[in-house]
Amino acid sequence: MDLLLYWIGLTAVAVNALTGVLDAGRKRMDLVGVIMVGSATALGGGTVRDVLLDRTVFWISDPTYLVVALATTAAVFFAVRGLRLPPRLFLIPDAIGLALFTIVGTQIALEWQAPWLAASLLGVITGVVGGVLRDVLCNEVPLVFVRGELYASAAWAGALAFIGLQALGMSAVAAAWTGMAAIVAARLLAMAFRITLPTYSERE
Amino acid sequence: MDLLLYWIGLTAVAVNALTGVLDAGRKRMDLVGVIMVGSATALGGGTVRDVLLDRTVFWISDPTYLVVALATTAAVFFAVRGLRLPPRLFLIPDAIGLALFTIVGTQIALEWQAPWLAASLLGVITGVVGGVLRDVLCNEVPLVFVRGELYASAAWAGALAFIGLQALGMSAVAAAWTGMAAIVAARLLAMAFRITLPTYSERE
Amino acid sequence: MDLLLYWIGLTAVAVNALTGVLDAGRKRMDLVGVIMVGSATALGGGTVRDVLLDRTVFWISDPTYLVVALATTAAVFFAVRGLRLPPRLFLIPDAIGLALFTIVGTQIALEWQAPWLAASLLGVITGVVGGVLRDVLCNEVPLVFVRGELYASAAWAGALAFIGLQALGMSAVAAAWTGMAAIVAARLLAMAFRITLPTYSERE
């Protein structure tokens, strides 16, 4: 499980760095601006999780994460620079990054003795904060808010499924894959069919 | 004092969750968006205080706070959904939440050996950050800035009164009630009579 | 070196508080709003650095920093209140504050056993976060983003020079002065000649 978590974590960092570059590129930032947005997207969620858990921040204790974030950002910058990409393209890696980070974050919080309800929310925070930083730094409304597209709710459901399936006796590895698949599926289905949750109908 | 602090803390969490829902409701968010804004409003100030003091974050060490925040948010969501509430209604619970959190935050910082000046500012941070998060997430100018309505200044004066009255020999419990009453009174009077502080008159 | 660092840190706090007041003043904030923006600008970068390094926050462990930030803010408020200052005046102290904080932050991260790559980024964070907070609180696009004016890149180059020159055998004090001079020079030259980095040319 620990090795799996490590590789999932590195993949999540690379995938989120990719989404950061694709989003920052739409704003005509320069190279260093793009590197900062990419790195903040890749490392932001895990950083907040580690600070809340009072754990050594993961990219300070293991510089591999930092190298992966910087290298992915620079590589994507030069690879896609000048291309016209469809603006919604980055939603698919975004869904994958959300799923990977949510499950890694939940698992780390459980290992760090957080109670299950807090652990599920720390998973959601790990999954969501990078994208919120990306959207705020790019001056867009965070994907996680306002739109009824099951963003935080998909992450939360996946984190609770991951915890619940383990409590029911499923192995941690199988529960992790199930939780991640559920999050990606929920996000993609919600985007495809515009599934929404009940909204608060008060008007201004 | 500790028991009083605990109950004041729980009440402050519930009151701030309520203001978060009332504000988020005006933005047509869905259920999970409202829960996130309500929880961030309820738990944000204390979380920043605990991180700065290097204390275990209160809602991770005691899940009761988390349950109260989530339950209040969901209950208020379903209770007031569809009602047309006057937009300024939430200013009264907001003033109460500000007062409760400021005094709790100051007292915890003092117990954690912060010097008195830092403790008073940690109290202001505890009181103010939840509302700032709420306003930023709802894409409004934070109440605490720009308007000359004694927001942070009321909180700071209350925190300093709480510390000063104890130094003059008043019991902690009496000083806490006095500080909280001063904050609520200052906010409500400032709103009623539009009391302002000197402003910096440079023009653009 | 430690004494030098201490004085550089205090100077950086005062200089950043000054830029915060000059910027907040343009927004017609009241006295307490200005004090909050000035203090956040002065103390924000070092606070984030200390939280990430799991170090006691510097203005809680040594209240001198807090007193300097508050006193500078209040003094500048009353000194320049009502004057019409050229809007770009604050860019010079801003460059100096960036240089001082970046080198102090890098050195503290190295002393705290961060690997060199993470330490250079913690230096950039220390230098940049105060100004980002100032710009966000004053509702402006952060100087560090979008404009091709070598802001974070100047800080990063200075931090890497500071680390590299020490690795090549230069004394810490000489490397610190060289790094700081490089950051100020790069910022001022970039502003004077509008030097830019390659940008990502995709259009919306």
Image: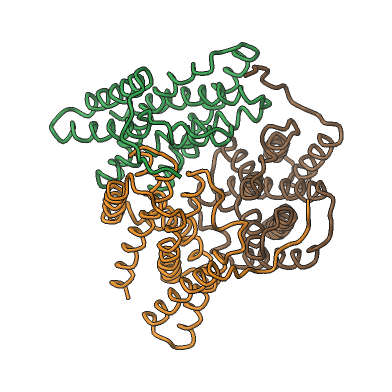
Chain colours: A green, B orange, C brown
Name the spot of residue B62 as percent of width and height, x first. Answer: 28, 56
Name the spot of residue B43 as percent of width and height, x first. Answer: 39, 53
Q: Judge whether A123 appears above or below B195 on screen.
A: above
- Left or right of A28: which side holds C79? right
Instruction: State the residue lying farthest toward the left.
Output: A168
Quadrant in the rendering for residue B7: bottom left
- For the N terminus of chain B, the quadrant is bottom left
Q: Which sits in the foreground, A83 or B87? A: B87
Q: Judge whether C199 appears above or below A56 on screen.
A: above
- Can residue A113 be seen here? no
Quadrant in the rendering for residue C74: bottom right
- Can residue C51 be seen here? yes
Q: Which sits in the foreground, B73 or A92? A: B73
Name the spot of residue A16 as percent of width and height, x first. Answer: 47, 26
Name the spot of residue C167 as percent of width and height, x first. Answer: 68, 37
Instruction: State the residue lying farthest toward the bottom.
Output: B169
Q: Judge whether A198 appears above or below C48 on screen.
A: above
Number of numbered discs: 0
- Left or right of A148: which side holds A165? left
Residue at 33% over, 44% down: B82
Instruction: State the residue lying farthest toward the top.
Output: A83
